[in-house]
Amino acid sequence: MELGQALLDQQVTDRNGELMGKVDGILVEFRSGKPPRVAALVIGGGTAAERVHPGWMRWLLRWRRRWGPKDDQPLEIPWSKVRKIGVDVKVDLEAERTSALAWEQWVREHIISRIPGA
Amino acid sequence: MNKLLEIALGLVTGIGGFLEAGSLATSAQAGAAFGFQLVWAIALGTICIAFLVEMAGRLAAVSKHTLPDAMRERFGIRFFTVPLVAVVLVSFLVLASEIGGVSLALQLITGIRFQWWAPAVALAIWLLLWAHNFNLVEKGASLLGLVTLVFVVGALKLHTPLSEVGAHLLPSMPQQDSAKYWFMAVSIIGASVSPYLFYFYSAGAIEDEWDEGYLGVNRFVAGLGMGFGGTVAVAVLAGAAMVFHSRGIQIDRYEQIPLLLSQPLGHWGFILFVASLGIACFGAALEIALQIAYLIAQGFGWKWGENIRPGQAARFSLVYMIAILLAGLLILTGLDPLKLTIFSMALTALSLPVTVVPLLIIMNDPEYLGENVNHWIANAAVLFISVIACVVALVAIPLQFLGGS
Amino acid sequence: MGYWRCYLLILAISPALLAGCQSSPESQLQKVQQELASWDATARLTRELSQRGALPPVYVRQVSEAVEQGRNQAHQRAAKISK
């Protein structure tokens, strides 16, 4: 559990060293007779906003539903995929293939690439 | 050899990059209104920023975190939003002031009102960042920034009594106009201790992949670079003291300021003033726009970088685009750039504790700094200056606006 | 949420407190006089330097405009204080 707290808000990088986002939340698994443990890391989907203030999350989600990528669900990274924890949290995934970069890709397609020189 | 080059570059950037709209306007106003009395404010502000810049560099070199990254990690998203919002808002106003400064430089030589230059200036800033070769742009801007040394030449040509400057390195009480005096003092401190300087420095240190071997370089660059930079600000104040104070001229418009170089240096004085104003503000605008983008991108874990294609850091690029656009629009409205500049400097001073205290906490955390945590002197100096500046600003700002001035 | 009420209260009271710090009409008029003297001196310095050939005409025009605007604003303020 302490590990979980320490993990929150850390930078997450993928297997190629690309920046994926921050650990916006953690999913904890409660097991009977054993101490709870971190089941997954959560990135995106308004999770961070919820931690600031639940009202913010609702407002943010309403706004995000109007525009932005369709695949806007928070990304859950199972604990098994976490490779190394140090300056940042390295996970064994490819960022571009996950929904962590959904917004990055959306902004890239709809705004940035429309401008010459991008 | 490489480290020597880094030092040289860092020094050049420190000297050339220190002066911008804020320091220029506040130093000129202070020199005109109070002669040499407020030299101590520049000295105090310079000491504070030198410490802060060194800290930002040390944090990057030892912990490999940029400041916003470390701040979010250490404090969690909830508390992070407070400095995030404060710094973004204040930096935005300063960015607008810099665009105003460049626009004014263009107005001075062409006669066309500054607000009509704002779109072109904003476009130019954006284009240079979009070209994602910031290393080149930065080095160019730093070298060109050395033109601001003309203020030192001017001050010397005016036979500035160095004894006067020295005598006022220590704070003194005003004989009259207290509200104005303290307001100017905090504005000067706000101009010197701009958060964008140390946020930008921290990002640079990470991109240049500094490690613990660079701690000495870091200290040298921060101390000497900011020190020399502060000297340029003192030169502006001295010039204003020699040319304006004795004649009873107070600075209420940007258009008056070039006279402080025209007097000693004639024709060249005007040209070099315009060049200094334009180059210094333009360089600062580039950095502030990037810094706003860094703060948001690094705080949220997005991809960032000034030397990668915009397509590869889409959200980061979008942020600086929007910042520049909005700042340009603000100047286009014709808002008085001098008032905007002075106001944003005072606001910076007011927000200092919010910006600085999180950094201080991190700098004393062995988890990030190992054995390189802060010396108590650094903590004391920065904390003292920031808190005093904030408290004085809290009183001085409303007094300035309401107390019949 | 109780914090916000405290802040609002402080914000509401402060103008009253600060109004007490308002300077007298005499000192306000004195400030306006200083401003006018400043604009006069600016105009004089500009003339001096312009005669020396140190200033381009396009700039001299701008300073003259600024001086005029400054003077007008100062006169307006003086009129308001005298009322």
Image (cartoon, rainbow, N blue to C red):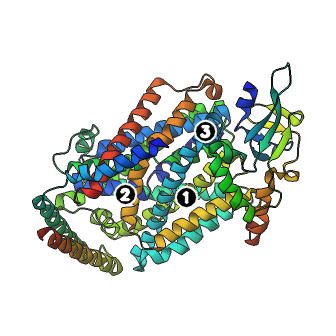
Q: Are marks 2 and 3 in contact (CB under 8 Å)?
A: no
Whichever of callouts 1 and 2 sits on the residue coming sooner in the sequence is 1
Which part of the image, by quadrant, shows the N terminus of chain A? top right
Image quarter for residue A85?
top right
Q: Residue at x 39, y 37 (%)?
A: B387
Type of the residue with mark 2: Ile
Q: Identify the secondary structure beneath mark 2.
A: helix
Tell me residue B88's x, y (percent): 54, 53
Classify 10 Å Cα crowding around label 1: few (below 14), some (14-19), many (20 and above): many
Classify 10 Å Cα crowding around label 3: few (below 14), some (14-19), many (20 and above): many
- Nearer the observer, B241 or C53: B241
Which part of the image, by quadrant, shows the C terminus of chain A? bottom right
Q: Nearer the viewer, mark 1 or mark 2?
A: 2
Q: Which residue is mark 1?
A: B141
Q: In this view, which residue lies farthest toward the top? A: A33
Give the chain of mark 2: B
Give the chain of mark 1: B
Q: CA distance from mark 1 to mark 3?
A: 29 Å
Q: Nearer the viewer, mark 2 or mark 3?
A: 3
Same chain for the residues under marks 1 and 2 in the image: yes
Tell me residue B210's x, y (percent): 66, 38
Q: Which residue is mark 3?
A: B71
Whichever of callouts 2 and 3 sits on the residue coming sooner in the sequence is 3
Tell me residue B58's x, y (percent): 59, 34
Q: Is residue B145 left or right of residue A44?
A: left
Type of the residue with mark 3: Met
Q: Which residue is mark 2?
A: B342
Q: Identify the secondary structure beneath mark 3.
A: helix
